[in-house]
Image (cartoon, grey):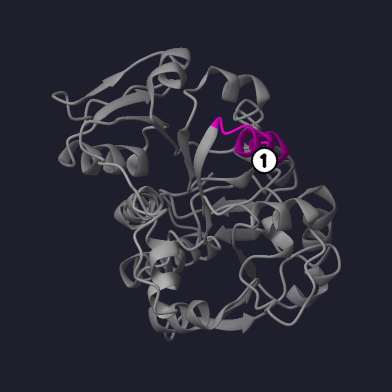
Amino acid sequence: MHSIAVFSTQPYDSESLTHWGAGQFNWQFVSQKLDTVTASQAAGSNAVCVFVNDDLSKPVLDALAALGIKTIVLRCAGYNNVDVAYAKQLGFQLARVPAYSPEAVAEHCIAMILCLSRKLHKAYNRVRDDNFSLNGLLGFNLHGKTVGIIGTGRIGITTAKILSGFGCNVLCVDPQPQPQLPSDSCRYVELAELYQQADIVSLHCPLTPETFHMINQQSLAQMKTGVMLINTSRGGLIDTKAVIEGLKSKRISYLGLDVYEQEADLFFKDLSDHVIADEVFQRLLTFPNVLITGHQAFFTAEALAQIGQITCQNLHALLNNQACANCL
């Protein structure tokens, strides 16, 4: 059987991959993320399997190539952590999971919107303290609000459809408009119009050089005072320091983050007994109108099953010199 080194492994990863790859692969599960230090743990493997925060920059790719590894599979859709051009130059085969339950991320996005709009996170803590006062918990109806969706891939379209069901007016931005968008309540506009009109802005685009820090001081200045900002896509889309200033000036009244630009040293770990040195992240946590989850949006039973199944299919195809529809 082919030996696969799996980095950034959590218990649910090993369970899913072991199930879907039963009898096909010899798994070597590594809890640490892949970087120049941990790359040596892939010695003797035929391929590596990585996740969103693993480092696949030139030095790490050089280290894997020196070990004779030529196959890399990502158990995620995004690949901004991979130097794809250099990997191909070295002769690596690359594959990803381009779509796994877009409903999982879309529904988490909606959950964040509703939690913030109705202050459910605050209400939950109050009731546990036997405080049943409604003062300070005034919310707003989602029905009739204008929501801006930036990025209409499968997750963005699914989110737009759900919001349409709530009775929202949905404005969308994407360089490649999609025909699946509901036409009765959703329409494509220019980014400037979305910023000016949206009560809620939700990010669903990949992280590229063009989208890095697209939410910054200049873009925030174009948004409505009191806007809600949601990011379930990639942390680097947001200039966190600019967003903190937006919270302080009350330009942003609600912020929901499932991703964070410096999350690699934080997320997917239990740091409850540690002092977190990231002062920017700690500052975010001081705001009562900020809701943060730790890259949890994808985390449903349905999504995990699809990730495990497609990852194993990709490995089987690449390691047996078969066609793979999910190659980069």
Question: Is residue 249 one of those drawn in magenta?
Answer: yes
Of residues 120 and 201, the one nearer the viewer is: 120
Question: Is residue 100 one of those drawn in magenta?
Answer: no
Residue appearing at x 79%, y 63% in the figure: 35
State the extent of the magenta-drawn residues as a range. 239-251
Residue under label 1: 244
Dominant SS of magenta comes to helix
Left or right? Give the position of 298 relative to 29.
left
In which quadrant is the C terminus drawn?
top right
Residue appearing at x 43%, y 60% in the figure: 298
Residue appearing at x 62%, y 25% in the figure: 210
In which quadrant is the N terminus drawn?
bottom right
SS type, badge 1: helix
Count of labels in the image: 1
Q: Is residue 53 visible?
A: yes
Q: Measured from the top left, where is residue 22 in percent x and y?
A: 42, 85
Q: Is residue 231 above or below residue 52?
A: above
Q: Measured from the top left, where is residue 108 in percent x and y?
A: 37, 56
The type of residue carrying mark 1 is: Ile
Q: Is residue 310 visible?
A: no
Residue 282: quarter of image: bottom right
Residue 252: quarter of image: top right
Left or right? Give the position of 142 relative to 248.
left
Left or right? Give the position of 253 relative to 54.
left
Residue appearing at x 48%, y 63% in the figure: 296
Q: Residues within 10 Å of mark 1 (few under 14, many from 20)?
A: some
Of residues 108 and 275, the one nearer the viewer is: 275
Of residues 250 and 293, the one nearer the viewer is: 250
Q: Measured from the top left, where is residue 239 in percent x and y?
A: 68, 36
Q: Measured from the top left, where is residue 36 in percent x and y?
A: 84, 62
